[in-house]
Amino acid sequence: MHGRRGPAFWLLAGFFGLFVLFLYGPTLTILVLSFQGPTGGLTFPMQGVSMHWFGNLFEKQMVGDFAGSFERSMALGVAAMLVTVVASFSAGLAFRTRFRGSATVFYLAIASLIVPSVLVSLGIGLLFRVLGWDPAWYSSAFGAHLTWTLPFGLLIMFAVFNRFDRRYEEAARDLGATSWQTIRHVVVPILLPSLIGVGLFGFTLSYDEFARSLYTSGTFNTLPLEIYGMTTNVTTPVLYALGTVTTAVSFLVIGIALVSVIALRRRRERHGSDAGKAA
Amino acid sequence: MKRVSAWVTYLQVAPLALVFLLFLVVPIATIVVVSFFDYNTTQIIPDFLLQNYEELLLSPVTWRTYLQTIEFAAITWVLTLLIGFAVAYFLAFHVRSATWQTVLFLVCTIPFWTSNVIRMISWIPFLGRNGLANTTLLQLGLIREPLEFLLFSDFAVVLAYVHLYTLFMVVPIFNSMMRIDRSLLEAARDAGATGRQTLWNVIVPLCKPGIAIGSIFIVTIVMGDFVTVRMMSGGQSASVSLMMVNAMSLLQYPAAAANAVVLLLLVLFTVAAMMRMVDIRKEL
C-alpha cells in the first residue's frame, strides 16, 4: 500500500472517474438543457439561452399542478423526517436491551426493505379500498413512506449505538441524572450528527418516493407522481426545468445536512464535547 | 446499573412496530386475502377462489414476463457487482487519505438522494434519436444511421438500472472492505501471494457479507420495478410489477393481488437464499 502508485492505481482511478461521469453526466446535461431557448427542443443544440421553461413551469395550466404537488411532497418529506428521526432513535434505544419480540420487529424492518415498494403501495391501496376509506397523501401515503424511511433509520441507529460508548451514560447517571436527563443532555447531543443523517434519509427518501405513492396518494399527486405523469404527455424542455428544480431542492437539503454536521464537528473540536452543557 | 423497566422498552419500540404492523403486515395480509376474491368489471367480491392463481400460472405470458424480470435482475446484478466492487476497491485500498476517501464516497452517494424519475429522464438527451450519443457517432463516421436501440429498449432499461442502483453495491462492499484488517494483506504479501491472489483469496472472501447485502438490494429492487421498465423500454418490455400495475389500471384487483403474492414469494425465497451467506445484524 506504500510507495509509488502503480498502474493498477491509475487504471482504477480512470475507471472511478468514468463512473462519476456516468453518475453525473446525464443530470448535468438536463441542467444545461433546462435553460434552452423558447424554440429549442429536448436535445441539443441549444436554441439560445433563456429562463422560458422555468417560467412555464409555474403556469398552472401548462404542466398540471406543479406548485401544489411540490408543497405536498415538501410537507410529506418533513413529516416523514420528523417521525423517522424520533421513532428510529427511540427504537434504537429499545434495541439495546433484549426484549421479547425484538427479533420479530427487526425482521419486520428487514422485510419492509426487501418487499418491493409497489407491493406495499398495492397492499395499502387495497386495504383502504376494502375498508371503504379514501387514500390521501397525508394518511396512506404517509404510512407507505414510513415503511421505507424507518428501516433505513433503524439500521443507521443500530450502527450508531454499536459505536456509542455507554460510559457517558453511566457517568451521567452516577452524577445523579434521571434517564430522561441522560438522554436529553448526554445521548442526543453526542448523537446529533447521526440524527441529522437519519433526518436526511427520512426527508429525501420520502420526497423522491414514487412507487409507494402510486396507490396511496389518492386524488392529489405528490411531486414524483406529477413528474412521472408529465413524462408521458410533455415533450418540451419544461420537463428538464422541473428536473433541475427538484434536483436543486435535493442538493439544498443535502447541503444543509452536511453543513450542519460539519459545523457541529467544528464546534466540538473547539469546545471539546458539549455533552451535558446544553441548557 | 439500574434496569430499565420492560414497559419503557416496549413504549420506545412501539411507534416503529405500529407503523410496520399497520402499513406492512396488514396490507400484505390484505393482498393475500384479496388474491382469493372474485371480481367483475365494477367491483371485487369476497370469495375463496383459486381462479386468479390458475389464470395467472396457466398463461404463457406470465412465465415469459417472470423470465424477463429474472433476466433483468441477473444482468443488472452481474454488472453492478463488477462495477460496485471495482469502485469500492479503489476507494478502500487506493485512496490513501481519509479526507479524500470521505469526499469521493460522498460524490458517489449524492445522486442517491435525488429523484430516480428525473435521473431516468436525464438519459433522453443522451440516448434519443438526435441525442448526444448518436450525433457523436455520426460525426465520427462510425455509423451512417442513428442507432434506434439506444433509447426505449432493453439496453436502456439495464443502463438505467446500473445508473440508478450501483450505489447499493458500492456502499456495503466498501463497508466490508474498510473492516478488513490491513495487516492481513501484509501477511498475504509476506507469505508470497501475488496481488491477484491476495484479491481473490483474502479480500473477496472477507467482502462476502457486503456483496450479499448489496445483492439483496439490487435483486429485490429490480424484481419489484416497473417504472424503469415502463419509461426506458418505451412499452416494449415487460416486468412482473408492470403486469400487476396494468391489471390494477383495469381494476382487476384480485388478479393483481395473486400476481403480487407470487412475486413476493419469489423475492422472499431469493432473499432467504442470499441471507444464508450473511448475518445482517453483525454487519452494522
Image: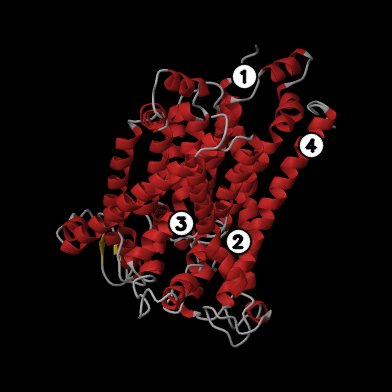
Chain of residue at mark 2: A
- Residue A197: mark in rendering: none
Tell which residue pokes out farthest to the bottom in this image.
Answer: A39
Element at label 4: helix
- Marks 2/1: CA–CA distance: 39 Å
Q: Choose mark 3 or mark 2, whichever is in front.
A: 3
Image quadrant in which you'd find residue B68:
bottom left
Reading the image, the residue beneath label 4 is A266
Categorize mark 2 by other alpha carbons within 10 Å: few (<14), some (14-19), many (20+): many
Element at label 1: loop
Can residue A80 be seen at all in this image of the molecule? no
> Contact, CB < 8 Å: mark 3 with mark 1?
no
- Marks 3/1: CA–CA distance: 47 Å
What residue lies at 51% left-to-right and 79% top-to-bottom? Answer: A234
Kindly identify the amino acid type of the residue bearing the numbered disc 4. Answer: Arg
Relative horizontal placement of residue B61, taking residue B72 as reference (left or right)? left
